[in-house]
Amino acid sequence: MDRLDFHNEWYNNELARQEVLNESVNIPVGILTAIFALYAFLLSGYNFDQGFGTFICEFFCISLGLSLLAWLCVLFNISKSYNNHFKGYEYGYLPFAIDLDTYYLNLVSYVNTNLSMLPAGTSAESMFDEYLLKSLQNSIDINAQNNSKKSSHLFQAKRLLLACIIFLLISIIPFVINFLKFNKENKIQVFSISNASEIINKIDSINKKSNNGKAIFKPTETNTSSSTSCSSTKDDKRGKGNSTSKK
């Protein structure tokens, strides 16, 4: 393999490497999106009103804060790897085909005009190959440096992403403890009537005034009081019946 073919293959490999590095950020970006949604769920579901100031709350805030810090660092490195934030990466490329052809024709004209002044064996083809070699070398240097920077930031992003996930998993432990401790208590609703006796007395008075003493409402404070009132009513009726028969 001559020098021109070697550098041409290297040039193509660096361009292919650029595409691979750009596509490699897709998976970390997807994971960051899912983690952000999980942050929103944890913060909205944690009961800070009852659990604030406790060791569990502090442990939750610290672990989640470290995870969020790692998340931001991952985002920084991904942005740096993909597009150097907003600056972008300037890659080196060969000139357009029409420009190369124009340059070659100019070399042919130059060699034909100055053949006597040029070293022996000089031709337009050899000069054109040397020009291509220099162009390839310059482009390779630029592209290789850019790809090395991309790869370095992507590697840092993956390391920080692992730390982000670890701290996030740790923060789930105090979240579950808080949920089991407080949220179940909030689901139990106790209803009480403070003036129950007054309401029962009002219903009794309405019963006495309605339908000649026949009860419309039948409130009962307890089962014992209800059974007692019923038995006393029956005894009264029996007493009235006995008195009538005697007469």
Image (cartoon, rainbow, N blue to C red):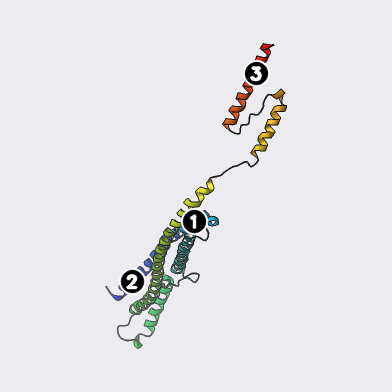
Q: Which of the two labelled residues, at mark 1 and mark 3, occupies the earlier sequence position?
A: 1
- As helix, strand or loop, the secondary structure at mark 2 comes to helix
Residue type at mark 1: give it: Leu
Asked if residue 95 lies left or right of residue 208, the reply is left
Residue 167 picture location, percent across and down: 42, 62
- As helix, strand or loop, the secondary structure at mark 3 comes to helix
Residue type at mark 3: give it: Gly
Residue at 42% from the left image edge and 58% from the top image edge:
169
Asked if residue 173 lies left or right of residue 198, the reply is left
Q: Which of the two labelled residues, at mark 2 and mark 3, occupies the earlier sequence position?
A: 2
Residue identified by numbered label 3: 239
Against 28, residue 186 (above or below) is above
- Of circles 2 and 3, which is in front? 3
- Of circles 1 and 2, which is in front? 1
The label shown at residue 42 is 1
| View extreme (bottom): residue | 117
The label shown at residue 10 is 2
Q: Which of the two labelled residues, at mark 1 and mark 2, occupies the earlier sequence position?
A: 2
Residue 115 picture location, percent across and down: 35, 85
Q: CA distance from mark 2 to mark 3?
A: 119 Å
Residue nearer the viewer, 44 or 247: 247
Asked if residue 50 lies left or right of residue 213, the reply is left
Residue at 45% from the left image edge and 54% from the top image edge:
177
